[in-house]
Image (tube, helix red, strand yellow):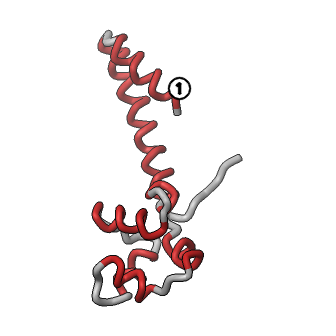
Amino acid sequence: MLCHHLPNYLRTYRKRSGLSQKEVAFLLGFHSDSNVSRYEAPNHRPNLETLFAFEIIYDTPARELFAGVYDETKKKIRERLRLLSEQWHAAGSGQAADHIENHESKQ
């Protein structure tokens, strides 16, 4: 079954937690709740420190908070792994290609 995720679920987790945007902004060290609103929008991604802060605030891994971004990244990496494996096979680097194939089978 194919499952499409939203880019992020920050608003969903904030609502579940019962926190307002202003309260989350305070926890993140922001002066305005507009920053939280921007992060809750589909195309705005936090820096690493803010990402970890969201994990802590919502007690949820980043890959769940940003499920759509995670899925898209995973898809891109798998395609690049496939291409790299093909390149290594063509170059006769069988051991390296086997490493890539083993990695893909674990996914």
Which residue occupies 48% across, 68% down? 58
Q: To which residue does mark 1 refer? A: 105
Number of numbered discs overlaid on the protein picture: 1
- How many residues crowd mark 1 within 10 Å: few (<14), some (14–19), many (20+)? few
Q: Nearer the viewer, residue 66 or 57?
A: 57
Residue 11 is situated, as x and y percent measured from the top left of the image, at 52, 76
Identified by mark 1, the residue type is Ser
Question: Height in image: 82 above or below 53?
Answer: above
Q: Nearer the viewer, residue 56 or 83?
A: 56
Which residue occupies 71% across, 46% down? 1
**Res 80 → quadrant:** top left
Residue 79 is situated, as x and y percent measured from the top left of the image, at 44, 37
Question: Height in image: 21 above or below 84?
Answer: below
SS category of the residue bearing label 1:
helix
Residue 34 is situated, as x and y percent measured from the top left of the image, at 37, 87
Which residue occupies 33% across, 77% down? 28
Residue 86 is situated, as x and y percent measured from the top left of the image, at 39, 22
Q: Nearer the viewer, residue 65 or 52?
A: 52
The single residue placed furthest to the right in the displayed view is: 1
Which residue occupies 36% across, 79% down? 27
